[in-house]
Image: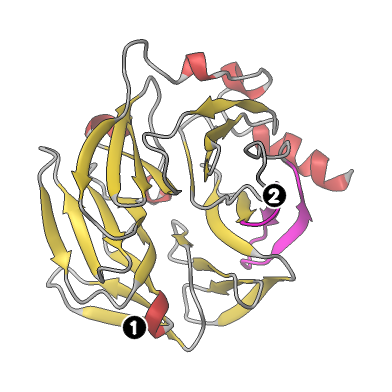
Amino acid sequence: MRFAVVFLLAIGCLPAAVSAQDMPLSQVLIDGEDWELIGEGYQFTEGPAVNRAGEVYFTDVRGNTIYRIGLDQQISVFDDQAGGTSGMMFGADDRLYACRNREKKIVAYNADGSLEVLVEGIGCNDMLITSDGGIYWTDPRTEKVWYRSPDGQVRAVVEGVRTNGIILWPHEGTLVVTDHFEPRLWAYRVEKDGSLTHGEAYYAPLRILPGAEIPRSDGMTVDRDGRLYVATDAGLQMFDTTGRMGGVIHKPQQAFLSNVVFGGPELSYLYVTCQDKVYRRKTKTAGHPVFLNAAR
């Protein structure tokens, strides 16, 4: 398949030691470490995003509030009028970008706290920011992935897929989206003009809980070696760069696992949003936010 060839070439951009082997959970999890409760008492947590310092921001969608987790794990309010924000990500310009789902807006928070509205009138669930300032986001209601170029041009780049979560591989050449209702992860080649081509269900099927009909797959993150982590009802499912399943990390509680990001010191902790709570877990690896690719 042409797309499979593209992916094999893309894998070559990753470290040689991890490019052609299975990468099981033993390479990620630390013996004796488990999930640590960071915050609780929220209505519905989502959208974890990490900044350059390793601080993690998350949103309580129903509570209409964005919170910041400091490196000391103390939680503070960042915005208490967040417009139903769901997905978030920091850009290379160090601004926090957010999908204001309820308002159908994509905004960026400036250093002085003011907001810049970048997109209006289009549904948005989850998002990512490229190192050159492009924005991709999912709109499950219209089954589309949208793209805003760095110069402000907006267009649909994927149609007919019930998209939910969205992420880029560390080298930015491959974009992955989840389908909340199907055990498939759709992967696309990212072209220079922002178009997405050669879409294929590259990864092994997601695991579904016994008796369940759908995986309820949602947010994702990647580590520095290109491993993909997907939040699902069955747990945090990990895939290696060849698309093979590496294992499932158990959920911290029996509740909806909505999203995941690497953060904290050296970006070595997995942070997850799980219904009314936020947890973290120390790992042997580290995240690779896209903004690390940008020239400073």
Q: How is the image coloured?
A: secondary structure
The furthest residue to the front: 211
| Residue 22 highlighted magenta (yes or no) | no
Q: Is residue 95 above or below residue 228?
A: below
Residue 162 shows in the view: yes
- Residue ID for mark 2: 213
Q: Nearer the viewer, residue 37 or 156?
A: 37
Q: Nearer the viewer, residue 21 or 99?
A: 99
| Residue 184 highlighted magenta (yes or no) | yes
Please give the range of residues in magenta.
180-202
Callout in the foreground (2, 1): 2
Q: Residue 224: which disc?
A: none
Residue 122 lies left or right of residue 52; in this view the side is right
Residue 126 lies left or right of residue 75; in this view the side is right
Q: Residue at left 49%, top 14%?
A: 26
Q: Nearer the viewer, residue 109 or 231?
A: 231
For the residues labelled 2 and 1, the Cα–Cα distance comes to: 38 Å
| Residue type, mark 2 in image | Glu
The furthest residue to the top: 31
The secondary structure type at the circle numbered 1 is: strand
Q: Position of residue 140 (x, y in %)?
A: 59, 70
Q: How many marks?
A: 2
- Residue ID for mark 1: 117
Which is nearer the N-term, disc 2 or disc 1? Answer: 1
